Image (tube, rainbow, N blue to C red):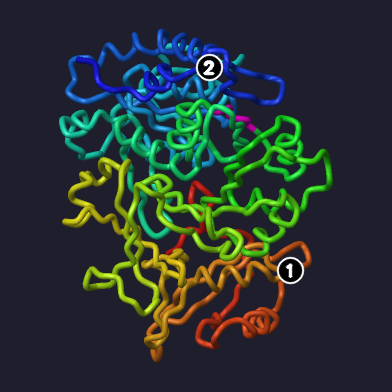
Amino acid sequence: MSRFNIVEAIRVRAQPEAVALVQKDRTLSFAQLLEECDRLVAEIRPHLAAYATRADRVRLGMHFPSCLDYVPLALATLASGACFVPVPDELADEEKRELLSRTALDLVLVLESASEWLPAGAEVLATLAVGGLAVKLARVPSTSQAGFPRDAFEALNPAFIRFSSGTTGKSKGVLLSHESLLERITAANEGLQIGPGDRVLWVLPMAHHFAVSIVLYLYHGATTIIEATHLGEDLLRAGAQLSATVMYGSPVHYRQLVEAPELAPWTTLRLAVATAAALDAATAQKFHARFGLPLVQGLGIIELGLPVLNRDGALSAPEAIGLPLPAYQCLLRDEQGVEPASGEAREICLRGPGMFDAYLDPWLPRAQVVDEQGWFATGDLGRRDESGRVFICGRKKTLINVGGMKVFPEEVEALLNTHPKVQRALVEARLHPLYGEVPVCRFIASAEGAPTAMELRNHLRAHLAAYKIPLMFSAVPELPLTASGKLKRA
């Protein structure tokens, strides 16, 4: 008996002549997209036959730039019956090879011109033509140290593996089944309300967001407009000229958008969602002043999708992540497993549909990660306002304890990043013989030159208690980042 496949669910719902994808002067209808997907499946599937007698599903990696042609190639990996493993382009070659090993990857699709990172012994089985580019389908030599049970892996009907950001330690391989993927995009769309009349301006890296966001748009019949650059002027031009109705991006994109020069008015926009990093109030206010719409922050989390969205409070409390969507519940839990009424920061716990099925490495099924009531502990610390909206204060693992006083490094970083001579700051704990821990700061200076420690202390003193101000400040040429651009903390 055939098992449920998300690509077939998209096919059943698709309106053949409706536009699925746009990138500059290229357009693909749903019919053309699915035809291209089927053509690629016909070339990929024969090479999966060598694994037919094995107990577990083939894991097929894909290393390809974010563009229109990414979509049919990614759909083809899913439709072929393989488990899709995106390999982000920004990873170092050693990190890419580690990902191959930790997922026990069998095959990989990679541009012929960008395949030098493949491990020694990789065997090219075929070359596929994808949008005028030559893509190798290569067999990866088995060097895996992964210890996941192959029968349990297969039993989940695995669709997708993506590694978490690893901001505070080693990242985990998050596994989603085809069924969980459908639950997730259905639940998220209760808040987004995306449908066939929408045209979504897409600016995020597909290796990190494809399996939830792009799949959601395709399943619900929307058009995805792919903009290759992140410049505000280009985003504004694409949105206005192509009549985008929805934008889904990071605060970085919106900061550039609000400062872009005046071009053609963008009058079709109905919803703008900020995710992937904390939204600052200044950007939200500028966005509302320019476009007449609230900038809505959401909590995007690889383990659950989009469970929390700030649709109703975006104007009055733009820095909140908001309220849980109808299908989800949120608990700010203390050590006793209950939410206190004090309003102090507690760990954000969530439950609802579309939750991840397992961590791959080390192997942990969902049932061993959530508690007895089905709550998933996110590791984020949050508080509620009087309307019940949730604000993220920081990460549980990054909390700095200064003589019993709590410091959220994210709060300090957000203020430091507003200094005109600071591009980006990282605040961490350093052991101290008297206080236990104290905050220290590394920062990248702006083109104006590095500020003095006194300038930074004075900048913070007006907004923060003295114990929250870093003891030391160091200008550095770069900061450690995860593959998705988040600060990587010790």
Which one is nearer the viewer's eye here, 128 or 112? 128
Indicate the position of residue 323 as horizontal and vertical percent values: 44, 58
Q: Secondary structure at mark 2?
A: helix
Relative to 66, residue 30 above or below: above
Using the image as rendered, state which of residue 141 and residue 199 is in the foreground: 199
Task: Measuring from the top left, give residue 453's x and y in whole percent.
Answer: 66, 81
In the image: residue 212, left or right of residue 25: left
Q: Which residue bears the numbered disc 1? A: 420
The number of numbered discs placed on residues in the rendered structure image is 2
Side of 283 relative to 472 (left or right): right
Q: Secondary structure at mark 1?
A: loop
**Residue depicted at x 29% and y 31%:** 179
Q: Quadrant of the N terminus?
A: top left
Q: Quadrant of residue 400?
A: bottom left
Q: Residue drawn 55% across and 16% down?
A: 130
Per the picture, the main secondary structure of the magenta-coloured stretch is strand
Q: In this picture, which residue range is highlighted in magenta? A: 222-226
Mark 1: amino acid: Pro
User: Crowding at label 1, few (<14), some or many (≥20) Cα neighbours within 10 Å?
Assistant: some
298 to 84, vertically: above or below: below
Return the residue at label 2: 30
Sequence-first tag of 2 and 1: 2
Q: Nearer the viewer, mark 2 or mark 1?
A: 2
